[in-house]
């Protein structure tokens, strides 16, 4: 054993000595090679050394680009930067480096200008001037095709021989095509801070067609027949936005926007949603937790058929102040406190007729005299979730004065309320919801108190939205325009001539709607939405006085709707939205219209570039 141990020790010592000797030999060889290498020549003042690079085998050759992982030799020039101009004929000359235009073009785009999904100078991915002026162009095509049935007055000259009933053939079709082009020019690098300023221009063209089966509905003149096709072009947006100041290190800021611009005053568009002209001052605080708006609009008249802005003004001024608070008392729940003022002085406008010749201001009912409406809204809304429960709610109180309400036939003091609550839960790919909507009604239109509720210009996104028959259709009373029990894209039975061109009316029956619904994410591209609504009037006295018809029932009907949203490319560039709804009238609706089941069906197709 001792002999074997001695032998192993001798072998280890010998191995160590051999390794040390090898290292010494290699070191000596390297030093000798460096001593024999020629010294690097120092170029003369005007000398231009040729650029050499290492080849694939380690050798160098003139004007050959180095590989991505190769190390430059002592006489090699660095590779040219992207964007520099060199050619094989530059051998023997100094490499010329030219700076790129900006940092966005270090890697030039290989995609065509008409590709909106990749880097594109038309979509604000590259500056168009200097290094901080960007252009964003957006084109939109919106096609709406719809068929529906609704109570339609037969008028003085019926469409069908022998038609003697007040309401005639109720079928109608609507085709509307809009094209919009929006250009936005902004200054500033917006990855981490607000832009300095932005200019927005949007032009919209519209062609629409309406066909009904009774005369006196597309025009007061029965000779105009049963169809109407019109076109319109409008400057819908024209605004400049300026970043005034930063108020924190997290870029909380204050900005101002002047001109024609869109604005939605709450989460679900229950009171005001419009594009019009005015001034908006807005900002944020505490890392964007608080967001505030001050808005003043001086309303432009709307085109009757296209619903676009004109250059004519009406004496209606709107002031809105609101404050949004994120994570209010609970993470994931947002709340809003708001104030709205609607000062609509129709007395200065005179008698106003729409494009078809129907009277819209004042409402063509009752005394139909010019009047001034001044209404103040105080509101609290919320949207978000508390734990597993999704919640959305709203409450508004409106007060004010109408100095000559057409239905009341006198001046009235306004005091009305709106309440809304939606609760929903998510289970895998399904969402189940239940909601209720309430607006107060006037129980005595002659007592000088207007207890009904009306919005300024709503577009509610609740209870099925535009899929719902009651919300989407305008159901009118009387011929030659008249007033509507409900306006298009509104839930409130306000009995006014037009949501866009008429004046708010707080002498109305009010409405209560109970809803159950569900939405399903069937695939990544298809979403299905279904809703069932039960409706009843809150107070019927106003309808009885207006129609001179006693004992109108409270219940209105049952509205069942189904809609889908199909996004084939998993983005918002192509959205196809088909829908269908059936409205089953109950006692109160039958008392007014003597109607059976009503329907709507159609689709929207939105294409965006």
Image (cartoon, rainbow, N blue to C red):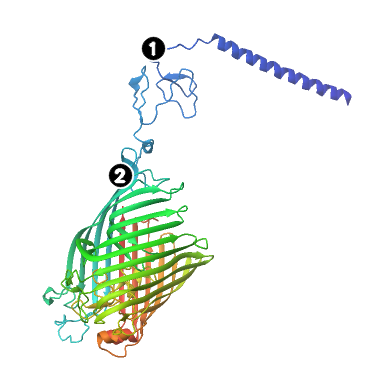
Count how many numbered circles sit on residues in the image: 2
Which of the two residues, 251 or 129, is positioned nearer the viewer here? 251
Question: Which mark, residue 113?
Answer: 2
Q: Do the residues under discs 2 and 1 have CB atoms within 8 angstroms?
A: no
7 above or below 162? Answer: above
Q: Quadrant of residue 577?
A: bottom left
In the image, residue 14 lies at what x, y percent? 76, 18
Q: Name the residue that disc number 1 marks.
A: 45
275 above or below 541? Answer: above
Q: Considering the image in quadrants, where does the N terminus appear? A: top right
Which of the two residues, 343 or 356, is positioned nearer the viewer here? 343
Q: Earlier in the sequence, mark 2 or mark 1?
A: 1
In the picture provided, is 482 more to the left or to the right than 195?
left
**How far apart are labels 2 and 1 at the CA level?**
48 Å
In the image, residue 157 lies at what x, y percent? 14, 81
Which of the two residues, 406 or 62, is positioned nearer the viewer here? 406
**From the viewer's perspective, is the residue at label 2 or at label 1 nearer?**
1
Could you say whether the residue bearing mark 2 is in a helix, strand or loop? loop
Which of the two residues, 494 or 534, is positioned nearer the viewer here? 494
Task: Name which residue lies at 42% across and 57% down.
Answer: 291
In the picture provided, is 422 more to the left or to the right than 403?
right
Task: Name which residue lies at 39% across and 62% down.
Answer: 322
80 above or below 132? Answer: above
In the picture provided, is 118 more to the left or to the right than 68?
left
Residue 428 visible in the displayed image: no
Could you say whether the residue bearing mark 1 is in a helix, strand or loop? loop
């Amino acid at each position: 054993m001792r002999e074997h141990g001695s032998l192993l020790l001798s072998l280890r010592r010998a191995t160590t000595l051999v390794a040390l000797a090898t290292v010494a030999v290699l070191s000596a060889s390297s030093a000798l090679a460096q001593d024999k290498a020629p010294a690097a020549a120092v170029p003369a003042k005007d000398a231009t050394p040729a650029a050499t690079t290492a080849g694939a085998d380690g050798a160098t050759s003139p004007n050959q680009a180095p590989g991505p992982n190769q190390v430059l030799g002592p006489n090699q020039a660095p590779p040219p930067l992207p964007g520099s101009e060199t050619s094989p004929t530059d051998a023997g000359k100094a490499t010329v480096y030219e700076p790129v235009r900006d940092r966005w073009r270090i890697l030039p785009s290989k995609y065509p200008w008409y590709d909106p999904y990749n880097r594109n100078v038309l979509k604000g991915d590259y500056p168009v001037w200097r290094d901080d002026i960007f252009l964003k162009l957006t084109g939109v095509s919106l096609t709406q095709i719809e068929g529906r049935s609704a109570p339609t007055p037969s008028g003085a000259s019926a469409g069908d021989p022998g038609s003697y009933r007040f309401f005639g053939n109720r079928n109608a079709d609507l085709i509307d095509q809009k094209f919009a082009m929006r250009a936005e020019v902004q200054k500033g690098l917006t990855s981490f801070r607000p832009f300095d300023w932005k200019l927005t221009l949007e032009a919209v063209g519209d062609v629409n067609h309406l066909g009904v089966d009774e005369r006196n509905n597309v025009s007061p003149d029965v000779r105009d027949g049963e169809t109407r096709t019109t076109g319109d072009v409008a400057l819908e947006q024209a605004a400049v936005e300026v970043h005034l100041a930063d108020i924190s290190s997290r870029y909380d800021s204050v900005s101002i926007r002047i001109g024609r611009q869109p604005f939605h005053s709450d989460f679900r568009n229950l009171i005001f949603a419009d594009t019009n002209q005015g001034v908006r001052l807005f900002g944020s605080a505490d890392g964007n937790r608080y967001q505030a708006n001050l808005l003043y609009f001086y309303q432009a008249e709307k085109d009757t058929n296209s619903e676009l802005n004109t250059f004519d003004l009406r004496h209606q001024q709107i002031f809105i102040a609101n404050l949004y608070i994120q994570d209010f008392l609970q993470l994931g729940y947002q709340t809003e406190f708001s104030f709205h003022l609607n000062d609509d002085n129709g007395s200065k406008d005179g008698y106003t007729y729409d494009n078809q010749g129907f009277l819209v201001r004042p409402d063509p009912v009752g005394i139909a005299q010019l009047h001034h409406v001044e209404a103040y809204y105080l509101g609290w809304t919320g949207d978000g979730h508390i734990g597993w429960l999704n919640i959305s709610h709203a409450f508004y109180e409106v007060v004010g004065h109408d100095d000559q309400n057409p239905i009341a036939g006198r001046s009235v003091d306004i005091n009305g309320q709106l309440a809304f609550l939606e609760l929903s839960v998510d289970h895998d790919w399904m969402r189940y919801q239940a909601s209720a909507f309430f607006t107060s009604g006037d129980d005595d239109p002659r007592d000088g108190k207007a207890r009904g509720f009306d919005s300024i210009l709503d577009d509610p996104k609740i209870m099925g939205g535009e899929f719902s028959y009651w919300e989407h259709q305008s159901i009118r009373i009387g011929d030659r325009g008249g007033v509507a029990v409900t306006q298009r894209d509104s839930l409130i039975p306000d009995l006014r001539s037009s949501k866009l061109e008429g004046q708010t009316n707080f002498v109305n029956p009010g409405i209560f709607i109970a809803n159950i619904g569900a939405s399903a994410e069937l695939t990544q591209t298809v979403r299905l939405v279904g809703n069932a609504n039960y409706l009843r009037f809150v107070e019927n006295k106003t309808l009885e006085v207006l129609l001179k018809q006693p004992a109108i029932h409270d219940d209105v009907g049952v509205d069942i709707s189904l809609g889908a949203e199909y996004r084939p490319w998993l983005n918002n560039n192509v959205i196809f939205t088909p829908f269908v709804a059936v409205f089953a009238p109950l006692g109160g609706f039958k008392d007014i219209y003597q109607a059976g089941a009503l329907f709507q069906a159609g689709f929207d197709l939105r294409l965006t570039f």
